[in-house]
Each structure stands twice: as structure tokens, then as C-alpha cells.
Amino acid sequence: MLLLTATIIGASSAVYTAKILPKQWTSLYISLMVIGMGVLIIACFNRQFAYSWKKIIGLGLLASFNKGLTGGGYGPLVVSGQMLSGIEGKNAIGITSLAEGVTCALGVTIYFLTAKDIVDWRLAPVIIAGALCSIPFSVKSVKIMPTKLLKALIAAATIILGVVTLMKTLKAF
């Protein structure tokens, strides 16, 4: 619930910031942060962290701000951040799914209420249907996967996503 509250605050403030910052700079920032989180997971692979409310609040604010700012980076940042805050990987994935859903809904609502342009919603139903179809497979995969393997895959996927985003961003400059 605390992550959710921080998420709402961060997403709300980011929508307004996103309207004034150039997209390339925000994408560069997100890509470097996501890469950094993946590297941190690897660097701290065998360490256990004590759970911290302060870390979770900071993580929620930062991740939702990033999501509202660029539309991306929330999942890898929140999953890895929770793992570095003492939450086991499988739980971090479930918590992130709920928090990201709320963050997206809030961000879209605020954008819709403040946008001057007409939003093209044609792809939304197809994307939502695809996401819903993936749920049973995702849940089963996370449930049966050994914790250490899941942690390594999360770190690798986070770094790869960050590098791909960085490469796309650098081409845009």
C-alpha cells in the first residue's frame, strides 16, 4: 500500500514535468538508471538486505516519476529496487504488477484530462488483451523458477532493456 501511495504521488508530478523536458533527455536518464539497477543486482547478488520502509517509499516515488515522465522503466526499476530493499524476487514481481497497473491508469487519466491533443486508443484493446493472455504463463513461470535463477534473469533482463533503450536514445540525438 505504501508503494502504491508513493506511486500515485510520483506519477502525478511526472506528467506535468514530461510536458516541458525534451524526450531524448528523459529517455537517456531512464536507460542509464535501468542499467545501473541491473548492475547493482549483480554486484549485490549474494547479499541479503533488510527491509526498509524508507527505501520502498523512495523507490515508489522515483519509479512512478520515471514512468510518468517517459512511459517506461517502471517494471525493471521497481522489481530490482524491491530486491535491493529486502523483498524476495517472486514477491517483487507480484507487487510490481499491481503497482504498475495503478501507475499506468493514473498516468493515462491525468494525461487524458490535461492533454490538448486527441489520444489515439486504437491499439489499447489489443495490447490489453495480449497482456491479459500472458498472465497465467507469467505466474506459472515465476512460481516454478528457482529464486537464484530468477534473480539472475531479472538482472540480465534489466541490463538488456537499459542498453536497448540507451542505443535507441543515442540514435535520436
Image (spheres, grey):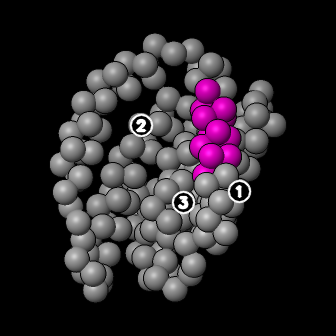
> Where residue 145 sits in the image (x, y, percent)?
51, 16
Residue 162 included in the magenta stretch of the image: yes
Q: Is residue 166 left or right of residue 108?
A: right
Q: Position of residue 63 (x, y in %)?
A: 54, 59
Q: Earlier in the sequence, mark 2 or mark 1?
A: 1
The amino acid pointed to by label 3 is Ala
Q: CA distance from mark 2 to mark 3?
A: 16 Å
Give the residue number, with chain letter if any, for mark 1: 32
Location of the C terminus by quadrant is bottom right
Residue 151 visible to an observer of this rendering:
no
Q: Quadrant of the N terminus?
A: bottom left
Q: Is residue 121 visible?
A: yes
Which residue does the numbered mark 2 point to in the structure image?
94
Q: Secondary structure at mark 3?
A: helix
- For discs 3 and 1, the disc positioned in front in the rendered view: 1
Secondary structure of the residue carrying tag 1 is helix
